[in-house]
Amino acid sequence: MKIIFKILIYLLFLSSYLYSKDTLAVISTKDFYLITKDSLQFDIYLSKNSDDWNAFANSTLQLYFLDTMFVADSSDFIFDYKTNTSDLPIFTSTGNQIPIDSYLIEPKVFKNRFSITIIGPEKYDDCQKLSLGQTIKLGTFSIKSKSKKNLPNYLKWLEPIYWYQAVVYKRDTDSLINNSIPFYYKNDNISMDDGKNLIVKYNIEHNPEEYFNFDNFWVIYTGQKIDSLGWSTKLEKDVNGYFIKRGVRTNIFEIEYSDLIGTWVANDPKYNPDYVSKGYSKTGHIYNPFYDTVYYRGGEYCYSLWANMNRKDGTTYDTLLASKCITVPNAVISKANPLTNPFSSSTIISLDLDDDCYVDGFVTDEIGNFVTQLTYNGKPMDKLMMKIGKNYSIPFNASSIASQGLYNAVFIAHPINDINIELSKAVVKLQLVKDGSK
């Protein structure tokens, strides 16, 4: 009985040993992103889970669309590897050459599947070595529909695994049976998966649900009846493109958006390629600057920003993201103040301009007689071109003026290329006190 019991224990141990599975590596597909509605991108990683192998040699990996509405076909799909996205040293020569000390990545489309072949070096010494627990990126891949289909944002590994998937390694020493019969040599390719004891696990890691996140929309008046527009997103997803409409406020409650100033739609007269979405981004994008020239000064112009979005069922819709209004000013001087007044010898006049102007600047005495021309940056202010801006510092040096008293600093702004606006004028009263007393 004891002998029979020992035999049974041995058989159970042997059975457990024979059918225990050792996972040599894990292939993970993750970071699925719809770059555009018809372009899918994803990454593939290789992790080393066992010390039974040393160096990655080559592989064949095959995926497919789980959704039966989408069938891989080279007539409709383009399958690409994105350059410089692999941790492997990549073979860059063209033609039918085989890599010697690097790897060749070949994505192809076959009937019902997307295939990735990675061909590695012939010798162990040239292969990519991995330490236990190390993960390397095999590459970023993209699938694009030629017919502009709205693609699903996921794939599946083609099954059965042992038929469609393969990962091969090399070891750093020869393997001998009974120390004499070669089982394989150092530079031989060895499959990681025998379907029984040695296996490779294949994972699909789908992204958590993400939603488009808008950030900001801005409109800035830059002068000469030109508005500058731009916008930013925090997370960009499922967007085809943007368009902007312009309107004029007719009263406090109503804005009539009648003019399209830019759109992502290619066949529209207002098409601008920079209005097309820049694609998926976890951190969003910035779109600017876009310029719009308005017809008249003095009005309040409003802009509405729209996005064309994708639904999960493949349909699209337009949604309003933001609206901004801005007043286009007349060519006016909005501020002219002396920094010191009264003054004994010189003072500075701070000048604000609400638009680009040609500016006259001069000083008169109390009854209007011309005293001196003012200057800015050493240039006489005689129809001097000055850009829209705040706190221009205009100096007035009165040291050569004999008598103290009251003076006028006069500024006249002439609008640029706009005959419909009257001249803008500002007069600054100044008091000159020679002895410094009031």
Image (cartoon, rainbow, N blue to C red):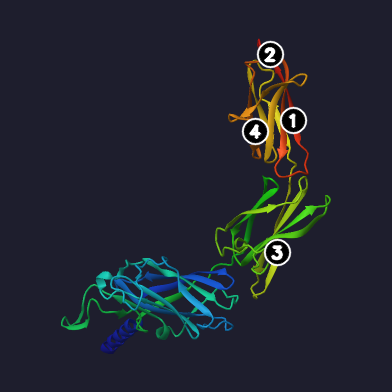
Q: Is residue 38 above or below residue 19?
A: above
Asked if labels 4 and 2 touch by Cβ distance under 8 angstroms, the answer is: no
Label drawn at residue 436: none
Q: Which residue carries the number 1 mark?
A: 426
Q: Which residue carries the number 4 mark?
A: 391
Foreground residue among 210 and 319: 319
Residue at 41% over, 81% down: 165
Residue 99: quarter of image: bottom left
Q: Position of residue 145 (x, y in %)?
A: 55, 77
Q: Position of residue 368 (x, y in %)?
A: 76, 21
Question: Which amino acid is tagged 2?
Answer: Val
How far separated are the C-alphas under marks 2 and 3? 65 Å
Question: Looking at the image, is mark 2 or mark 4 earlier in the sequence?
Answer: 4
Q: Which residue carries the number 3 mark?
A: 319
Asked if labels 1 and 4 touch by Cβ distance under 8 angstroms, the answer is: no
Asked if labels 1 and 3 touch by Cβ distance under 8 angstroms, the answer is: no
Question: Which amino acid is tagged 3?
Answer: Thr
